[in-house]
Amino acid sequence: MKAMMLRETGGLDQLKLEDVETPKPDSKEVVVRLQAAALNRRDLLVIQGKYPGIKLPAIPGSDGAGEVVAVGDEVNTVSTGDKVIINPGLNWGNDMDKKRTDFAVLGVPTNGTYAQYVKVPVENIYSKPSHLSWEEAAALPLAGLTAYRALVTKGKVRKGETVLIPGIGGGVATYLVQFAAALGAEVYVTSSKEEKIEKAKSFGATGGVNYTSEDWSKELERLTGGIDLSVDSIGGEGFNKLLSLGKIGSRIVSFGATRGPIPNLVLPNMTVKEISVIGSTMGSPQDFADMVKFVEEHEIHPILDSTYSLEKATEALFRMEKGENLGKIILAIPQD
């Protein structure tokens, strides 16, 4: 099969299209012939050597959708020909509140979805929502799961609340807007680009502010009167702004820190207002099942940015690295 193989970390030029052996399933595994895959920021970190637990050579990629073409001897819940999506969270365990210490994500060190075929445990296979195209289905798993757990399971968003999504653009942020709006929340976003704020309004946001403005948090406070729930992946200096915007008894869910650690954390804002700060990452199998059901019930279509052929994965990753995308970037997988 054709696959984008990573043999050394360091830069996007290390990712090469190769002919490699097609996987065969073990007794409790299935092999999926992928129709489409999707990019995640994790892929960039792996390629750059900035992600823990890297073992090479391996095929990157966590998101994918396709048809089952082979099943292990002990598999009886999935059949060849089934149209499926893949939950990329491996080894979560039986406790839905917290993952096991050996939890891992599909795509380095295990071979992932930048390939024509991928093998995964049968418990990670779910039926593809029928209203989604192959590209949309491939875009859903990791980002949709991360957004659902952060917003619903951890954030406990409620109808009528005011929700802030800083840094609209990436896949998780777009799902957060769509999911929160579908649940009846009033959603606001931030971005450095006015066109991204306007685009966010088209899929559920009420409004937004440009965070390059010196007084962006004051402007947002005037618009909203305060925030009930912030779901943040940025961290850095802006985190104190989230604390100042929070209402009494509000929540902040953090699932990343692209701007790094929080300098000079203003603890009094958190303690006096009794703000809860909650960590979240990926999600449990129950979260994944609930997320897929939610997407089906509300007929949510993932926001897609662009599609590249598999052999142009490095170009696709470069687009994501520059932060040019709004929504998910897709890889079309060749079928011959």
Image (cartoon, rainbow, N blue to C red):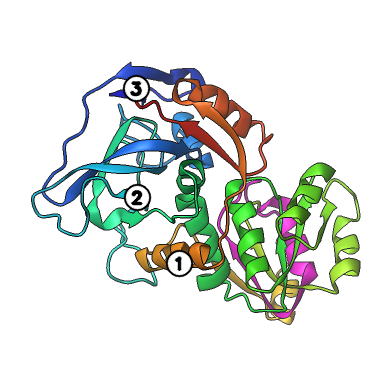
* Viewer-closest of 275 and 77: 77
Q: Which amino acid does label 3 sit on?
A: Arg
Q: Residue 293 carries which label?
A: 1
Is 159 situated above or below 73? Answer: below
Label 1 secondary element: helix
Note whether 163 is above or below 331 in the view shown: below
- Residue type at mark 2 is Val
Q: Is the residue 326 above or below the residue 160 in the image? A: above
Split into 4 quadrants, where in the image is the N terminus? top left
Residue 260 location (% of width, % of height): 63, 47
Gap between marks 1 and 2 measured at Cα: 14 Å
Mark 1 or 3: in front is 1
* Residue 253 located within the stretch drawn in magenta: yes
Label 1 Cα neighbours within 10 Å, binned few <14 / some 14-19 / many ≥20: few
The residue pinned by badge 2 equals 84
Residue at figure coordinates x 45%, y 25% from the top left:
310
* Magenta extent: 235-263
> Which residue is depicted at the point 55% across and 61% down?
299
Whether label 1 touches label 2, CB < 8 Å: no
Q: Can residue 108 be seen in this view?
A: no
Horizontal arrangement in the rendering, residue 39 relative to residue 98 (left or right): right
Q: Name the residue under label 3.
A: 7
- Of pointers 3 and 2, the one earlier in the residue sequence: 3
